[in-house]
Image (spheres, helix red, strand yellow):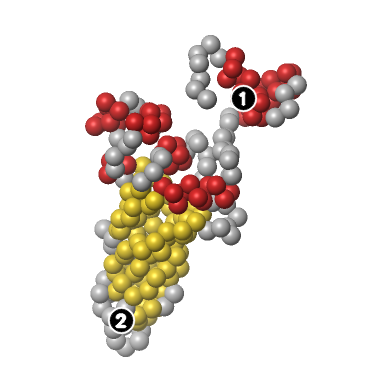
Amino acid sequence: MPELAFAVENVVADQDAAAPLLMFGVRITCAEPSIQVQSVALRCQVQIESTRRRYLPAEQARLVDLFGEPDRWSRTLRTLLWAHASAVVPSFVGTTLVELPVPCTFDFNVAATKYFHSLEHGEIPVSLQFSGTIFYADNDDALQVAQIPWDKEANYRLPVAVWREMMSIFYPNGAWLRLRQDVFDRLLGYKAQQGIPTWEATIESLLSASPQRVPS
C-alpha cells in the first residue's frame, strides 16, 4: 500500500474563477518510489489554527464578535473550520504537484470570513487534513484500492495579502452581507419610504440616526 505524504508549497488567487477561489499547490510524495499510483480521489478539510498567531490591538477589537473580549481568549480562542475541498490526482510515480481548489466566500455570516477580514497583515496558520482513496498497481500490475489514513495533514501559513488580493478581484472596494428575508424587507421598505437612492446611503442614514456613535 502506498504511503503518501502531503506538503503545501504555495497558494494563489484564481483570477479566472467565477467566484472567489484559492488554489493550493499540494506536493504529494509516495514513500515507495517504485509504486505506480494510478489516481487519487483526494478530499481535504481546511481549518484555521487561530491560536497559532499574535494579533494587533486593532485586530483584537474586530475579532470580539468571534471570540469575545481579548482577556477571555485563553478560553474562547479556538480552531475554525474554513472549507472542504476535493481534487482528482492523476497518475504519478514518486511525487507530483496538484492544485487543490479551496472555495471562499465574502458572506459575513460565516466565521472564517469574519476572521480573515479582521486581519491586517502577516500570515494565517491553516491546517489541511487529508482523506480519500488511492488507486494503484501492485507488482503484478493488478489494480488495488486503499484509503488515505485520517492522520495525514499539512500545515501552511497563508499570507493575509493573498486573501485580500482575491477579494479585491471579486468585490473591489466592497463587501457582501446576507440578511434574513424579513429584515431585508424592512430595510427595503425604509429605503423606499425615505426615497434613498442607494443601499450605502440607506445604511448610512440608519447609522447616523443611531443614538450610539458608530465609528466611520
The correct choice, above or below, for 176 with respect to 98 in the image is above
| Residue depicted at 49% across the width and 52% down the height | 103
Q: Position of residue 111 (x, y in %)?
A: 43, 38
Q: Which residue of the protein is positioned furthest toward the bottom in this rendering? A: 140
According to the picture, the residue beneath numbered tag 2 turns out to be 35
Q: Quadrant of residue 172?
A: top right
Q: Residues within 10 Å of mark 1 (few under 14, many from 20)?
A: some
Residues at marks 1 and 2 touching, judged by CB atoms closer than 8 Å: no
For image coordinates 29% across by 86% down, the residue present is 139
- Extreme residue in the top direction: 211
Q: Nearer the viewer, residue 182 or 174?
A: 174
Instruction: From the viewer's side, name the closer residue of 110 and 209.
Output: 209
The residues tagged by marks 1 and 2 sit, at their Cα atoms, a distance apart of: 61 Å
Amino acid of disc 1: Ile
Q: Which residue is mark 1?
A: 203
Q: Classify residue 33 as left or right of residue 17.
A: left
Name the secondary structure under disc 1: helix
Q: Is residue 44 above or below residue 179?
A: below
Residue 206 x/y as whole percent:
61, 19
Query: In this rendering, is residue 33 above or below 84?
Result: below
Q: Quadrant of residue 30?
A: bottom left
Q: Give the mark, 1 or 2, whose residue is nearer the N terminus.
A: 2
Is residue 65 left or right of 51 when viewed as pictured? right
Query: Could you tell me which residue is drawn at 56 percent across and 35 percent down?
Result: 177
Q: Is residue 47 left or right of residue 32?
A: right
Q: What kind of residue is marked 2?
A: Ile
Identity of the residue drawn at 38% across and 31% down: 58
Foreground: disc 1 or disc 2: 1
Residue nearest the observer in this picture, 135 or 112 = 112
